[in-house]
Image (cartoon, coloured by chain):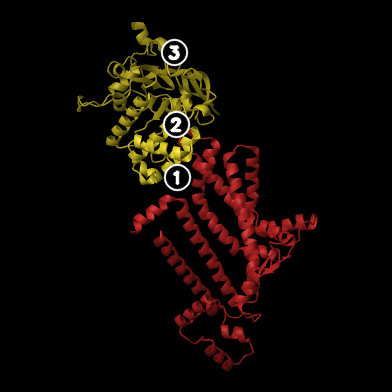
Chain colours: A red, B yellow
Amino acid sequence: MLSIILSRLGQATFVLLLVALVSFSMFRFVGDPASNMLGQEASQAEREALKDRIGLNDPLPVQYARFVGNALQGDFGLSYRTREPVADMIASRLPATLELALVSALMALTMGVLLGVYTAINRNGWLAQMIMSTSLVGVSLPTFLIGVLLIWVFAVELSWLPSFGRSGTVDIGGWTTGLLTLDGWKSLVLPAVTLGLYQMTLIMRLVRAEMMEVLRQDFIKFARARGLSERRVQFGHALKNTLVPVITVAGLQLGSIVAFAIITESVFQWPGVGLMFINAVYYVDIPVMSAYLLLVGLVFVVINLIVDLLYLAIDPRIKSKQVGAGS
Amino acid sequence: MSALEVRDLTVEFPTRRGVLRALDGVSFDVEQGEILGLVGESGAGKSMTGAALMGLLEPPGRIVGGSIHLHGESVVGRAQEFRGRHFGMVFQDPLTSLNPLKTIGAQLIETIQWHFNLGAQQAELRARNALAEVGLDPDRLNAYPHEFSGGMRQRVVVALALSAEPAVLIADEPTTALDVSIQAQILDLLKALCRERNTAVILITHDMGVVAQTTDRVGVMYAGRLIEIGQTDQIINRPAHPYTQGLMASTPTLAGDVSTDLYQIAGSMPRLDAIPAGCAFNPRCTHVMPKCRSERPPMTGGRACWLEATHD
């Protein structure tokens, strides 16, 4: 068990080092960092002095090692545009994105699994069929359009919810949370729904397909033959088997919720890291972009790690296979 | 009165191209402690009979006629009450019959507690006994299905099927997926357990060796109908229906001449949407008479055939 976790951790570290390499290369290949930092008017001598000072004349591996070392200590340099430390910028904006992602992920997961199970069990009922047809909309409409439609209905026409921004935040030890006030929740609802809708429909359709597949298996027939009620068979035997493949896809989807919050954050002017990234791209603010890339890489790697460990917890066959192959 | 009485059991599947009759007037009895074999080609209705008894017909299939009585109580329409508790079932493939994510103990205890009002400790004790009875180590209660071999898994399946002490056990090809050496073990186990508990057994198989070795009586099925039923010895050595005779002649024997080809019944079993009028076997029968093509022979003296009736 421990050896599996260690090997997964090793793989995760390797992936992160690769992401760091891409992040690092952005500095070298998207313009000249020295002129980016000093502006167009600086003299050649000033540029050389700066290059020497910040180590741009060192061999590449040394620069890379320094980049990784700094990143490990939370130092991503200064933003070209605002001259603020990038780490501070991210720290101040991360709570907004994480709260948004967390709420939409929870919504997508619970609703997705519930609706998926419901439509699988009552696949010929009119409500299930209606949910299935509606879910096509969720899968095929682009995120920004859903966001704009929601704003139009709930903010403009009905005036129930704010159309943009994040309000009602409370600062708890450097973490600004919007989850403690009604205002905060109100401003969170529309972006969270927009961000989670696609994932929800995807998870729902996946759960439905998997569940229907599992319900055809022999062990389900045998469980019925032992006299267990249909409900017991569905929830006691089928559901857990359904979740094994669902976890992989759901895990990756949740990663992309954090990574691709960009569009939702732009539509709703949500002050998170996605919006920060868009602005950084606009101003070619390389340190911010590269730090964002690292952050997204980290999120994906951590989620994958959790998915792998969940597998071990759920499916006993994996454990014995790994032990058999590993030792 | 027999333990299980099946009368004129008829199962139909409504489809877009018309109604398919999968079982047509099947009648038989099974006594307590008796093993009845059901044989026939694939699609003859053997498994369909088992599914109908269990109330586990795949929709849209349904029982449209006939009756099933267990100790005089009508079962049709109340299958859920009988399933597991009074009717147990063993399926063909032990590798897929068990939930891979639950320990065999959890599956046993769940089933026991479902049918009996027992506390956790009593249920576990019973589960341990059930494992011991099928020849497995009771301490392996916490093992997962994948930690057992195919034969051991079928023992677990048998323990599960018998855990609520059903009056009737339906075993649908219980050894087809197993090695020959394991087959005999599982059959002996089934036989011993059911004799001991006086369980009535319906053994569905297409293997004449299994039939000869295990069953007391045999029913032969063809195109959804029971065409001959009788003592195992009589069916194997003195089959009366031309189809059963063909079936026996096409079974290889040790004494047979290996230089000649094995006998085959000409043609193949009709599809359910094209069952001929009269006797379903008439297009393939070597003794066919005009009457066979128009009138369905009734079951008399354990066989449904005009030929035998005219001889008598």
Badge 3: chain ID? B
**Residue B216 pos. (x, y %):** 33, 20
Amino acid type, callout 3: Arg
**Residue A273 seen in this snapshot:** no
Q: Disc 2 versus disc 1: distance between alpha carbons?
A: 19 Å
Badge 2: chain ID? B
**Residue B165 seen in this snapshot:** yes
Amino acid type, callout 2: Ala
Query: Which class describes the residues within 10 Å of circle 3: few (<14), some (14-19), or many (20+)?
Result: some
In-image side of B175 versus A23 (left or right): left
In-image side of B279 versus A280 (left or right): left
Sequence-wise, the earlier of marks 2 and 1 is: 1
Q: Which residue is mark 2?
A: B164
* Above-or-below relation of B156 to A106: above
* Above-or-below relation of B39 to B137: above
**Residue A16 pos. (x, y %):** 49, 69
Q: Residue at x 47, y 36 (%)?
A: B111
Q: Which residue is mark 3?
A: B296
Badge 2 marks a residue whose secondary structure is: loop
